């Protein structure tokens, strides 16, 4: 069942967006898989092709406007203009995560072995802000121009629970995911005349390669942080990537969500609704 529409999915080699890309391909989209590591994209490609779908893995850094312009040229020549953009590339870096949850006087001493707000390497902090913020802005600018020229389209950005209230220890990630939601609103208002709807999904906690180290113990079971999250999640479990797909399909459906733009939808097992008391 081919619908011929082109969907560009950034972060398509990752946990959440590989599932989204596979679902789009199963619905007949021609899916462009974007990420830096071509091997990860090829793993997603193999699954899509094995299921009879069509896709094009293209390596680029979403923070790099020149690389993304080149990639756009390939997309136009091989597939045509983009109709759906899923901006999943992003995430955190261990070096930008504090090892303490609140200020300790020791962090101001030269011998401090942990990482507080005053010790996080500012370049790592900047990298996290850059990938989540500019890594969303740049693909939006490039591919929304296609949509504006061809009569409309739909964009989904990736926010987080940090969009609503910052979690401890992750200042760069938290501020950048708040920015994603704000930018989603701004862009939705700006692009409404072009018939482009812009929304965001805010996943709760889904275990990926990086977060596994933070949420799970190597010997099995939850880490202290993982257990804290589960205790604040009424459904008492982490999510699975497939549980985002229904929301994505609703948001990109120009009939079913025709009047929906500028919103951020939490998919979180109830995390935001639970005060913990
Ligand atoms: N998992 C969760 O619980 C959760 C919760 C809330 C929000 N989110 C957000 O949801 C999105 C997807 O998360 P995920 O769990 O699927 O993470 P993931 O498994 O780490 O996948 C993210 C993908 O983004 C790609 N990427 C990172 N930096 C990039 C760059 N500069 N240019 C191009 N691609 C880049 C990575 O591939 P390369 O390294 O090959 O480039 C990676 O495959 C992220 O924005 C994340 O912040 C996740």
Image: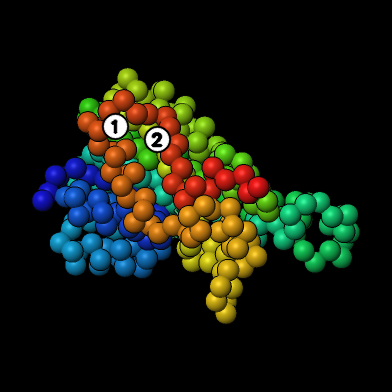
Location of residue 52 by image quarter = bottom left
With respect to residue 16, does 181 lie above or below? Answer: above
In the rendering, at what x and y percent does residue 242 appear?
34, 56
Q: Which residue is disc 2 drawn over? A: 199
Along the line of sight, the residue nearer the viewer: 194 or 260: 260
Distance in Å between CA atoms under marks 2 and 1: 11 Å
Q: From the top left corner, tell me how far across and down residue 191 is, in percent.
A: 36, 25
Tell me if residue 157 comes above or below residue 92 in the rendering: above
Q: Position of residue 37 (x, y in %)?
A: 41, 63
Q: Is residue 14 visible?
A: no
Category of crowding for the residue at label 2, using alpha-carbon neighbours closer than 10 angstroms: few (below 14), some (14–19), many (at least 20): many
Secondary structure of residue under mark 1: loop
Residue at image x 25%, y 67%?
46
Name the one closer to the observer, 190 or 277. Answer: 277
Q: Which residue is mark 1?
A: 257
- Callout count: 2
Q: Residues within 10 Å of mark 1 (few under 14, many from 20)?
A: few
Tell me whether the residue at label 2 lies in contact with that at label 1, contact meaning CB atoms closer than 8 angstroms: yes
**Residue found at x 14% / y 44%:** 3
Report the residue at 32% width, 20% height from top.
193
Q: Earlier in the sequence, mark 2 or mark 1?
A: 2
Instruction: Residue lying at the far top in this picture: please name it.
Output: 193
Please say if 252 is above or below 27. Answer: above
* Dot label at residue 30: none
């Amino acid at each position: 069942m081919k619908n011929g529409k082109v969907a560009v999915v950034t972060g398509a080699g990752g946990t959440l967006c590989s599932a989204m890309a596979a679902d789009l391909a199963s619905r007949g989209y021609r899916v462009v898989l974007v990420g830096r590591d071509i091997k990860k994209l090829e793993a997603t490609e193999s699954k899509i092709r094995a299921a009879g779908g069509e896709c094009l893995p293209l390596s680029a850094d979403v923070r790099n406007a020149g690389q993304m312009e080149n990639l756009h040229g390939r997309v136009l020549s091989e597939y045509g203009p983009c109709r759906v953009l899923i901006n999943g590339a992003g995430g955190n870096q261990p070096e930008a995560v504090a090892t303490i949850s609140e200020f300790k006087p020791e962090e101001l001493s030269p011998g401090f072995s942990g990482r507080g707000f005053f010790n996080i390497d500012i370049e790592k902090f900047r990298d996290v802000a850059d990938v989540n913020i500019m890594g969303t802005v740049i693909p939006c600018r490039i591919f929304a121009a296609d949509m504006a020229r061809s009569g409309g389209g739909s964009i989904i950005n990736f926010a987080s629970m940090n969009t609503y209230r910052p979690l401890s220890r992750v200042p760069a990630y938290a501020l950048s995911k708040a920015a994603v939601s704000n930018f989603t609103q701004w862009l939705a208002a700006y692009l409404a005349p072009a018939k482009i709807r812009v929304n965001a999904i805010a996943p709760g906690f889904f275990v990926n390669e990086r977060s596994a180290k933070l949420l799970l113990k190597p010997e099995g079971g939850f880490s202290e942080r993982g257990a804290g999250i589960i205790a604040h999640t009424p459904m008492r479990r982490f999510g699975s990537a497939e549980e985002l797909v229904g929301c994505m399909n609703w948001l990109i459906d120009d009939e079913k969500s025709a009047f929906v733009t500028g919103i951020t939808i939490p998919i979180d097992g109830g995390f935001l609704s639970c005060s913990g008391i």
